[in-house]
Structures are given as structure tokens and as C-alpha cells.
Image: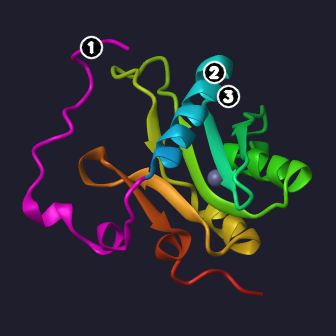
Amino acid sequence: MRPGRCKPLTDLSPLSRSGPLTEAAEPLSTEDLALVEQARAALLRHYRPFWHTLAAAIRGTDGRVWTGLHLGATVGRLSICAEAVALGRAVLEGDGGVETVVAVRHPKPEEACQDLEVVPPCGACREMFFDFSPDARIILPGPGKVLLKVPLRALLPNPYRR
Ligand SMILES: [Zn+2]
């Protein structure tokens, strides 16, 4: 981390503190904070620019935790999200039920701020989790980057159906 190069987390207007996501949010538990730390630790261990730039951690409905790494690919569209890797492990090694998910991103080398940050899941991952565990909870940054835990359904109010 390079101190002083990250944007401050304050200076929010009262209006930006509320909205559908913050209204749907639940308080983070001690286990949720530990889940964030497990994702961070996995990324710090395995970060490799371009190839492994994100990590995810899933707490299953059985209480067990699985981590996953983003898999970069020379053919960009073949890249695999960290959440998908973690979900695969949860299905293989657990009961496949997802209670809570979090993903963290490592900044690119050229970015001024080198802090790891929690990021929301991409649209495809939202759909994937909806297929496997529609009642999952997602930890993501809210206004001012304060962490929120929200129901997946709040992030995907109109999921794809075929
Ligand atoms: Zn994704």
C-alpha cells in the first residue's frame, strides 16, 4: 500500500447514504468479517497481475468456507471469475449451498491506490449464484465503501429465465 494515494471514504451527502441496497442490508457478523479476511488472505498469497487479480470466499450453508481465485486467460473471454472457482469447490467438497459470498480485487500495478477492495459480483456471477442458492447473501461495498451484506435477490431483481 502506498499511503495517501487512496481516496478518502468520507464526504458523502445524506442522500447517497440511503437507497434500495442500504435498505436491504443486514449487519455484518463476526463470521462475515472473517470471510472477508479469508478472501483477502487468499489473494495476498496468490496475487499475480493479470492471472489472479481477484479472490472470493464463500461460506456454505454448512458453515464451511471455500476460497477461489480469478483465473485470467490469454483469450480474455475464457477468464473465470473467482466466485465460480469457489462455488465449484463448495459443490465438490460441501453441500453446495451458499450462505454468504464476498470477492476482493487487487488493483492493477499502475493504479495509485494499492489497497485490496471488496467488489460486487459481476452480472454473470449473480445469475450463477441465483441458480445454485437464490437465498445467498452478498457482501459488497456500499456508499463510502462501507461494507454491506445484502440478499442476492436485491442485486438481481429480475433474473434470467429460459
Ligand atoms: Zn463474475
> Gap between marks 2 and 3, in whole Å?
5 Å
Total residue callouts: 3
Residue 22 at x, y percent in the picture: 30, 66
Asked whether mark 2 lies closer than 8 Å to ligand 1, one says no
User: Horizontal placement of 49 versus 16: left or right?
Assistant: right
29 relative to 93 in the view: left or right? left
Q: Would you place residue 99 above or below residue 84 in this image? A: below
Q: Mark 3 and mark 2 in contact (Cβ < 8 Å)? A: yes
- Report crowding for label 2: few under 14, some 14 to 19, many 20 or more residues within 10 A (C-alpha): some
First in residue order: circle 3 vs circle 1 = 1
Q: Position of residue 135 (x, y in %)?
A: 62, 74
Residue at the spot of label 1? 3
| Disc 3 element | loop
Quadrant showing the N terminus: top left
Residue at 59% in and 20% down:
44
- In terms of secondary structure, what is the magenta stretch mainly? loop
Q: Nearer the viewer, residue 127 or 17?
A: 17
| Residue position marked by numbered label 2 in the rendering | 47
Classify residue 79 as left or right of residue 29.
right
Using a 10 Å C-alpha cutoff, classify the residue at mark 1 as few (fewer than 14 neighbours), some (14 to 19) or many (20 or more): few
Provide the residue span drawn in magenta.
Answer: 1-28
**What label sits on residue 52 in the rendered view?**
3
Q: Quadrant of residue 99?
A: bottom right
In this rendering, the label closer to the viewer, 3 or 1: 1
What residue is at 56 percent from the left and 44 percent from the top? Answer: 103
Instruction: Name the residue at 35% across, 69% down.
Output: 21
Foreground residue among 52 and 140: 140
Above or below 87: residue 20: below
Q: Quadrant of the C terminus?
A: bottom right
Q: Secondary structure at mark 1?
A: loop
